[in-house]
Image (cartoon, rainbow, N blue to C red):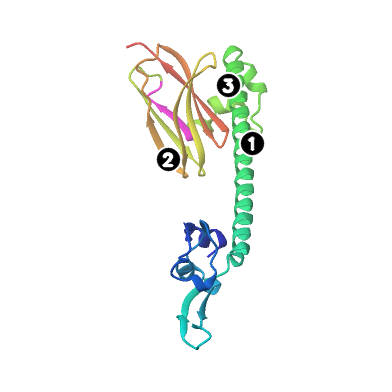
Amino acid sequence: QNSTDLLMQLRPKSYTYRHEEFPQMGLPEGVRYGFISQEVQEVLPQLTTPVHQPEQLDSLGNVEFDAVDYLGLSPLDILPIVVGAVQGQHVQGSAQVAELASLREALAEQRTRMDQLESMLAACCNNPDAGRALDTGSGTGTDELLNGPYADRKLRIVPNPFSEPPTVYYTLDRGGRMQLIANSADGKQLNVLQEATMQAGNYQYAWDTSALAPGMYYVTLLLDGQPMVKKAVKVTR
């Protein structure tokens, strides 16, 4: 066990010595703070020592005070364990701070990617030729993401066009953090349909479009920040 675990098993106490019962031992007065030797013995037996104080005789050889056996404990022996526990907590706290900073950095990067995606969608919708000029960084342009066979294979909306709520079918080539987002034709985010950490595989999502007005929309599948976009059209009955 480490120092912190050991210390957590000890229970600090306040106590006073039994002076009237053992006047010969010269015990200090007042309230004391520390640990009970018998409890420390259960956790750290190496810090306790059996002590025998022999009987005391008067000048005539009569027994004035009986012999006393007790369990001795030096509070100073616990100090190294306390120091080790404090050092362990410091190391653990530093690791947690570093992990939190890393998570914040990853969140900031994800937000930046989302902002870029929304700008890309807005530009594509307002200017159809703009999609051919944009690139996602992996060699696949926006026009390919919207209309190419890759999008048809990995992201499908059935039926499309639709009047009743459709089903979104999508495939994840690898596990990771995914988001399924619905956007209006002007590129503004309408709703995060689904968000989770998922394994690779085929999935489907029942998209509730009953509140949407007829028109053109975009469904975006994000896997670890990498976008795939599919056009969706709602028509009147």
The disc, 2 or 3, on the residue closer to the chain's N-terminal end is: 3
Q: Nearer the viewer, mark 2 or mark 3?
A: 3
Q: Nearer the viewer, mark 2 or mark 1?
A: 1
Which residue is found at the position 59% from the left and 28% from the top?
111
Question: Which of the 4 image quadrants contains residue 76?
Answer: bottom right
Three-letter code, disc 2: Asn
Q: Which mark is residue 129?
A: none
Residue 191 x, y percent position in the rendering: 46, 22
Residue 138 x, y percent position in the rendering: 65, 35
- Residue that badge 1 annotates: 105
Q: Residues within 10 Å of mark 3 (few under 14, many from 20)?
A: some
Three-letter code, disc 1: Glu
Which secondary structure, mark 1?
helix
Which residue is found at the position 60% from the left and 67% from the top?
77
Cα–Cα gap, marks 2 and 1: 30 Å
Residue 195 x, y percent position in the rendering: 46, 33
Q: Which mark is residue 202?
A: 2
Contact between marks 1 and 3 (CB within 8 A): the answer is no
Residue closer to the observer: 139 or 194:
194
Three-letter code, disc 3: Glu
The disc, 1 or 3, on the residue closer to the chain's N-terminal end is: 1
Q: Which mark is residue 118?
A: 3
